């Protein structure tokens, strides 16, 4: 039964007979134009074989490097180049790297990738269609919106996972890469089916020991396992490695011995992993070492690595998550949300071409509601990527159902109006808006050894949506969710409707019963990042302040009286956020410090909105488990029970949230709840 979880959305479950009937002509053979047995095209052929057998019950033979010409009823898969050399010119000029052409015509299927990876992606697209009972003729060219579609794991060499909620690491244990990499290969398969092309397996809070000879060999084994799926490996670096691992007296990025050390390490890595995707760097952040120790800039640091990987075609993902976590909360104008622009704006134009600045979607840290990071608008000469979080660190840690697709869509679609021109975040990170060649997506996933991967079957919709959005961010969050439901849970209409309903309601509900109006999630931030902890936000250096007093709440980020953060946005956006009248209700406390009695656009006061939203959100969360129970018998027992357990937990915990937050602000403000639910009546 573990298979139900392990295969995720790649179950290839048998189609109900009625839908099978629609497959009027089933191909009789798979023709694979692969180069080697470890090539993605070879894997594509195997997937096609398994998928067609599972979905349609027909076991097709696979012909590799066939002598025969493609019959009219074959599934042919390969690269454009391989096809051309065999069958004559096939010029699909609009294809770019990793893209594919998929043609289905009266049962005959041709899947051609611009490269081998593209061919595999095309095969997964075809299989997704037939798995959903879609046999319509198509002729589509599909290209990725951005070249960088990575996932980050935060796995420690010891085998624990930072912010991981599904058991120990599938990659590491006891300081080394694990011997049995079966789960890694299964993970690569899931990632490839979404078009994810690289993974960083180790934590951004990186251990220098990753770079020992033994671990480089281990990374080589990971790369070997993932390569057939087109998933390249990159690694997180600890900036002080030359000192901590290499025994040098310094890790100054401009020091000749340090440069030599990194150059040689890089050569050793590429010797074992010739297609290493590159490096990911967290420097001078949350206690991590960095170049500022030596009065060097973050660009000096990024460029050091960029030069080292450049001869091998590697890239450097340099994280913009740099801020002072020992900030002085008594200073009204201090603001962690300003940090990224303050650290990076003046460096624009100083990064080498193969550096990409990786920016968390909002200015703080994966909260339930944040505006888009202003940094996206401030470094037009620099490659950028957006960092999204699949692991639900602040969003209930997979014990709560929270489908995050709609949150990501709001950020990706947000128009920053740089220079008064349309500047959606998705167009910036794709490189389109500022004419950059590199850019894209990094998703923090943190799967573990649990056979559900994320600890929760329903949380897998987030991984699915992440990959699909990184391929094409214009897709609709609900449509992606529904693809995932059909692929994961089958074709029953009530299953589709029910999971759609609870998933689409889940982010708004969670926002309602956790942190409203842009005040942030209000989890305990000092220890667990789980459960309510409104008092933990303030009076410490972490900078996730709410500035709640007995009369007022919210961060004043205005230009004239506040931290000036609103002014980091381009003028048209700045104007909206700087003015309390034009700031949307859902971000009012992010940008403004107001009395609890301040009236929102909705007509409610801030405090009454808090009370009402918490009751509403918690009430919605009560409906999830009963809705799920109506599906008993329509889903395999294991997944049914495991999901039900979590939804019941969520129902209870939503009430804990509601009562804690309402009680906290009621005590603080002394303002009664108009509906008389909060406090003693
Ligand atoms: C958050 C998270 C940390 C993580 C950090 C990061 O603060 O709680 O665990 O290391 O983000 O993204 O670097």
Image (cartoon, helix red, strand yellow):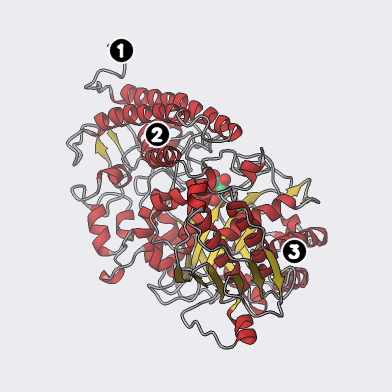
- The answer for how far apart the CA atoms under marks 3 and 2 are is 43 Å
| Circles 3, 2 touching at the beta carbon (< 8 Å) | no
Residue 273 visible in rendering? yes
408 w.r.t. 504: above or below = below
| Nearer the observer, 309 or 497 | 497
594 w.r.t. 47: above or below = above
* Disc 1, SS: loop
* Disc 3, SS: helix
| Nearer the observer, 554 or 234 | 234
Q: What is the crowding at mark 3: few (fewer than 14 residues within 10 Å), some, or many (at least 20)?
A: some
Residue 423 image point, x, y percent: 33, 67
Whichever of callouts 3 and 2 sits on the residue coming sooner in the sequence is 3
Judge depth for marks 1 and 2 and give the one in front: 2
Judge depth for marks 3 and 1 and give the one in front: 3
| Nearer the observer, 110 or 294 | 110
- The residue under label 3 is 224
Q: In this view, does 51 lie to the left or right of 137?
A: right
Residue 486 image point, x, y percent: 49, 47
- The residue under label 1 is 680
Looking at the figure, which quarter contains the N terminus?
Answer: top right
* Disc 2, SS: loop
- The answer for how far apart the CA atoms under marks 3 and 1 are is 64 Å
| Nearer the observer, 274 or 43 | 43
Q: Looking at the image, which residue is at 40% across and 26% down? A: 622
Judge depth for marks 3 and 2 and give the one in front: 3
Residue 466 image point, x, y percent: 49, 54
Q: Is residue 521 left or right of residue 644?
A: left
- The residue under label 2 is 514
Residue 679 image point, x, y percent: 31, 16
């Amino acid at each position: 039964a573990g298979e139900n979880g392990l295969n995720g959305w790649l179950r290839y479950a048998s189609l109900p007979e009625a839908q099978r009937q629609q497959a009027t002509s089933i191909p009789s053979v798979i023709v694979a134009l692969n180069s080697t047995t470890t090539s993605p095209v070879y894997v594509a052929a195997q997937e096609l074989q398994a998928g067609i057998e599972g979905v349609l019950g027909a076991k097709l033979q696979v012909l590799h490097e066939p002598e025969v010409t493609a019959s009219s009823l074959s599934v042919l898969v390969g690269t454009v180049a391989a096809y051309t050399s065999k069958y004559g010119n096939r010029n699909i000029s609009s294809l770019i790297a990793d893209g594919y052409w998929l043609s289905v015509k009266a049962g005959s299927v041709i899947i051609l990738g611009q490269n081998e990876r593209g061919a595999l992606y095309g095969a997964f697209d075809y299989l997704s269609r037939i798995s959903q009972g879609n046999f319509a003729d198509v002729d589509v060219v599909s290209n990725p919106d951005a070249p960088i579609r990575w996932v980050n794991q935060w796995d420690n060499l010891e085998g624990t996972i930072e912010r991981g909620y599904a058991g120990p690491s599938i990659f590491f244990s006891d300081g080394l890469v694990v011997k049995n990499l079966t789960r890694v290969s299964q993970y690569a398969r899931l990632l490839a089916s979404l078009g994810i092309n690289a993974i960083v397996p180790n934590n951004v809070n990186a251990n220098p020991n990753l770079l020992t000879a033994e671990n480089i060999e281990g990374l080589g084994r990971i790369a070997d396992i993932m390569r057939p799926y087109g998933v390249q490996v990159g690694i997180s670096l600890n900036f002080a490695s030359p000192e901590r691992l290499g025994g040098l007296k310094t890790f100054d990025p401009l020091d000749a011995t340090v440069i030599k050390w990194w150059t040689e390490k890089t050569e050793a890595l590429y010797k074992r992993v010739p297609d290493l995707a590159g490096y990911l760097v967290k420097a001078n952040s949350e206690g991590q070492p960095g170049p500022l120790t030596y009065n060097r800039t973050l660009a000096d640091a990024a460029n050091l690595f960029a030069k080292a990987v450049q001869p091998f075609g590697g890239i450097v993902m340099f994280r913009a998550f740099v801020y002072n976590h020992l900030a002085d909360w008594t200073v009204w104008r201090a603001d962690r949300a300003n940090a990224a622009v303050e650290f990076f704006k003046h460096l624009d134009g100083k990064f080498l071409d193969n550096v990409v600045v990786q920016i968390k979607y909002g200015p703080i840290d994966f909260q339930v509601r944040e505006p888009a990071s202003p940094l996206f608008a401030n470094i037009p000469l620099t490659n950028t990527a957006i960092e999204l979080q699949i692991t639900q660190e602040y969003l209930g840690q997979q014990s709560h159902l929270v489908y995050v697709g709609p949150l990501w869509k709001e950020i990706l679609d947000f128009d920053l109006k740089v220079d008064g021109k349309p500047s959606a975040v998705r167009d910036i990170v794709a490189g389109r808006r500022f004419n950059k060649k590199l850019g894209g997506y990094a998703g923090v996933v943190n799967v573990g050894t649990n056979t559900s991967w994320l600890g929760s079957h329903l949380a897998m919709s987030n991984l699915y949506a992440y990959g699909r959005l990184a391929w094409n961010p214009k897709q609709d969050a609900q449509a992606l969710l529904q693809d995932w439901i059909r692929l994961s849970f089958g074709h029953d209409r009530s299953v589709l409707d029910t999971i759609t309903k609870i998933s689409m309601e889940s982010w708004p509900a969670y926002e309602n019963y956790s942190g409203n109006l842009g005040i942030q999630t209000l989890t305990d931030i000092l220890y667990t990042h789980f459960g309510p902890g409104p008092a933990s936000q303030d009076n410490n250096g972490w900078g996730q302040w709410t500035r709640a007093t007995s009369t007022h709440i919210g961060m004043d980020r205005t230009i004239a009286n506040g931290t000036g953060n609103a002014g980091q946005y381009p003028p048209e956006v700045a104007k909206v956020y700087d003015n309390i009248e034009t700031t949307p209700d859902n971000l009012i406390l992010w940008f403004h410090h107001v009395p609890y009695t301040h009236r929102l656009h909705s007509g409610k006061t801030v405090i009454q909105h808090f009370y009402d939203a918490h009751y509403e959100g918690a009430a919605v969360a009560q409906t999830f488990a009963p809705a799920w129970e109506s599906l008993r018998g329509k889903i395999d027992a294991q997944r049914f029970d495991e999901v039900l357990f979590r939804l019941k937990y969520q129902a209870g915990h939503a009430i804990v949230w509601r009562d804690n937050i309402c009680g906290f602000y009621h005590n603080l403000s002394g303002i009664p709840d108009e509906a008389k639910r909060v406090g003693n009546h």
